[in-house]
Image: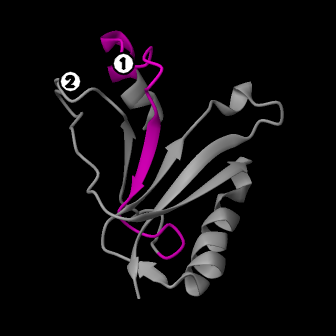
């Protein structure tokens, strides 16, 4: 999916922008949902006036309060990161998840990291208990 959106965004000059970031928006829980039924969107940040076409759509992430956790992860550490948020921080926080989707904001190319790690911010929409 990242290759597909990159192939669309590249010729439009959207990847050259220093503000361009990739996101993965989760509409289901990867830990609870069968991988064949998992719904997620792969996205790139774009200027508001960008025209979309074909299989590429445009959406706005709903506003609201989010818990934001920053990680540097190897590809096999994502489950641990999600568990740290939902099983560690969240139960003690005074917050609960709300109905908006969670998402990951990718901050680097892991090939450029000295240890091959992906820097990500994981956004978990929350509301008070």
Image check: 126 left or right of 30?
A: left
In which quarter of the view is residue 36 placed?
bottom left
* Residue 7 rendering spot, x and y as whole percentages: 39, 20
Q: Residue at x 60, y 71 (%)?
A: 85
* Chain part drawn in magenta: 7-32
* Residue 118 rendering spot, x and y as whole percentages: 67, 41
Element class at badge 1: loop
Q: Nearer the viewer, residue 27 or 60?
A: 60
Image check: 79 left or right of 105?
A: right
* Residue 13 rendering spot, x and y as whole percentages: 36, 12
In which quarter of the view is residue 97 placed?
bottom left
Q: Residue at x 72, y 57 (%)?
A: 77
Q: Nearer the viewer, residue 33 or 52?
A: 52
**Mark 2 crowdedness (10 Å alpha carbons): few <14, some 14-19, many ≥20:** few
Separation of marks 2 and 1 at Cα, in angstroms: 9 Å
Q: Which residue is mark 1?
A: 14
Q: Residue at x 48, y 64 (%)?
A: 35
Residue 105 got which mark?
none
Q: Dots 2 and 1: beta carbons under 8 Å?
A: yes
Q: Nearer the viewer, residue 27 or 85?
A: 85
Q: Nearer the viewer, residue 99 or 78?
A: 99
Q: Residue at x 66, y 63 (%)?
A: 81
Q: Is residue 61 magenta?
A: no
Element class at badge 2: loop
Residue 50 got which mark?
2
* Residue 101 rendering spot, x and y as whole percentages: 35, 63
């Amino acid at each position: 999916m990242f290759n597909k959106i990159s192939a669309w965004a590249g010729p439009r000059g959207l990847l050259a922008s220093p503000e361009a970031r990739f996101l993965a928006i989760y509409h289901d829980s990867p830990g609870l949902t069968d991988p064949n039924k998992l719904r997620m969107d792969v996205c790139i940040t774009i200027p508001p006036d960008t025209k979309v076409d074909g299989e590429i759509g445009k959406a706005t992430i709903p506003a609201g309060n989010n818990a934001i956790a920053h990680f540097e992860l190897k590809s096999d550490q994502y489950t641990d990161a999600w568990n740290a948020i939902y099983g560690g921080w969240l139960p003690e926080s005074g917050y609960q998840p709300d109905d908006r989707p969670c998402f990951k904001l990718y901050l680097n190319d892991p090939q450029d990291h000295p240890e091959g790690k992906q820097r990500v911010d994981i956004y978990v929409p929350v509301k008070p208990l």
